[in-house]
Amino acid sequence: MSAQSSEVPTRAWIVTFAGAACNLCLGILYAWSIWKKALVDKPKADLHEVMTGLNAGWPYLTDSQGTFAYFVCGLFFAFFMIPGGRIQDKYGPKVGATLGGLCVATGCIIAGLMKSYFGLMIGFGVLGGIGMGIGYAAPTPAALKWFGPHKRGLISGIVVAGYGAAALYIAPLGQYLIDNYGISASFIGLGIFFAVVIILAGQLLSNPPSDYVPPMPAVAASNPSSNPARPTPDVITDWLPPEMMSRWQYYALVLMFIGSAQSGLLVIANAAPILGKTAGKLEFFAANAWIIAAFGGAVNALGRVGTGMYSDKIGRSNAYVLNGAISALCLLAAPFIIASENVPILFLAVGIAYWQYGGGLALMPAFTADFFGSKNLGANYGFVFIGWGLGFLMPLMAGYIKDYTGSYDQSFYISAVLLIVAVVLCRVIRKPAKPTGSTA
């Protein structure tokens, strides 16, 4: 299929939506605040008390302990994106998605069976993070290889939207399972469900044939000079990971990823507890804090697709700056919103934070493909994704700050400053030029 046309093959869309389905299961990380709310009780944790009833055997955790399992999961996720990307590039996305899904499912089941902080660390943190990294690395590069540069933002947004939207159903389902069957049953039940869905959806993933040429817009296909985004040997080249890492732009992308990720991860890790505090005497919201996690999941997903779409129109950098600047203002205002117990404004601010975070996860693979080509995108994006993992240091630090000060105020201010720095960096980064004659 070496002839180029303007029509996208049906197979390309099957791969795209199958990838989104896989991510809908891998995204349990974004509903973590539901389990954190059930596990964290610092006074009881300080006394080493153990739960009774449905959750008999589970220990109470401090805020920092509740965040540390989330941090470990994110860290392993980020670093296993690198081997996950290599698996995708070498063996194809089916292998990566299936292996990753089985690791996540096994990790959830182990966490449920062990009923301990150590079990959470090993099951949810280590095995879950490894599975997420390997599984998440499979669908996005595979889908992007089926489309031209003019659709990279949209396609990247659709695939990763599945991961963001996961909290939309996992948050209420997880809360229902915790309330009616206990923490252990929630992990075990979801683990089994994830294994079935990811194994089935993963079989629909595939890379295009080696001689496949991504479709271009109808006008560009008939008149190549009319489309500046069309790949040509002079302007689009494929970089190997060592070549990419020799350029300052790689490190700039990592720092930009840290900036966009840390602010969203701070809110995601603490969404349910923050709503519980802001709601005050509003018993409905205090008792149903999962609502804000589910709401955030919906906005997170929409932010990925929406940002991907308008980044194809206004440019990646402009989209990143727009999202980041507005979100930074919301982070600065967050302590005042919480103190005023204004629930509608809290939902607005949290929604903007989720949109920015989701948008960043659509922009960064597109940035990576724009700067370093799509041939080695699985491996290259794995190295850029390290920035996302380092972003988990922010919610981890916030957990310690909360244990010692009783609030997240300082964390919001620090997060806003980091995001502003990333926005400034985005304004100065430019696509690297590869020396003539270099090949990947």
Image (cartoon, grey):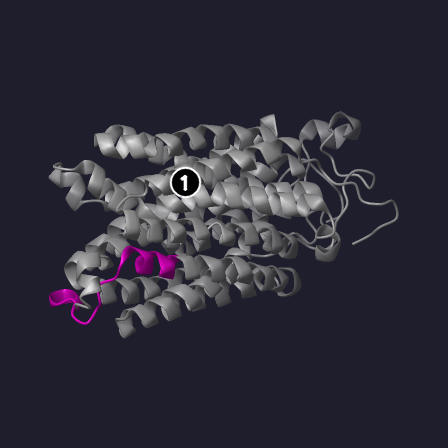
Determine whether, in the image, residue 350 is placed left or right of residue 136.
left
Q: Quick check: is 210 in the magenta stretch?
A: no
Secondary structure at numbered mark 1: helix
Please name whichever residue, 298 or 10, is drawn nearer the observer in this view of the structure: 298
Q: Residue at x 74, y 29 (%)?
A: 228
Residue 340: image x %, image y %? 22, 29
**Residue 351's x, y, as percent?**
36, 34
- Relative to 395, is 19 on the left or the right? right
In the rendered image, is residue 57 in sight?
yes
**Residue 47 falls in image quadrant:** bottom left
| Left or right placement of residue 320 versus residue 64 in this view | right
Residue 60 placement: quadrant: bottom left
The answer to which image quadrant residue 440 occupies is: bottom right
- Residue 430 percent across, percent down from the top left: 70, 35
Q: Amino acid at mark 1?
A: Asn
- Count of labels in the image: 1
* Residue occupying the point 48% across, 45% down: 261
**Dot 1 corresponds to which residue?**
300
Q: Is residue 283 above or below residue 228?
A: below
Q: Is residue 361 visible?
A: no
Q: Residue at x 77, y 45 (%)?
A: 237
Image position, residue 83 (x, y; %): 59, 64
The foreground one among 132 and 39 is: 39
| Disc 1 crowd, CA 10 A, few/some/many (<14, 14-19, 20+) | many
Q: Which residues are magenta?
A: 50-70
Is residue 325 depicted above or below 2 in this figure?
A: above
Magenta-span inclusion, residue 55: yes
The residue most toward the bottom is 114
Most extreme residue toward the right is 437
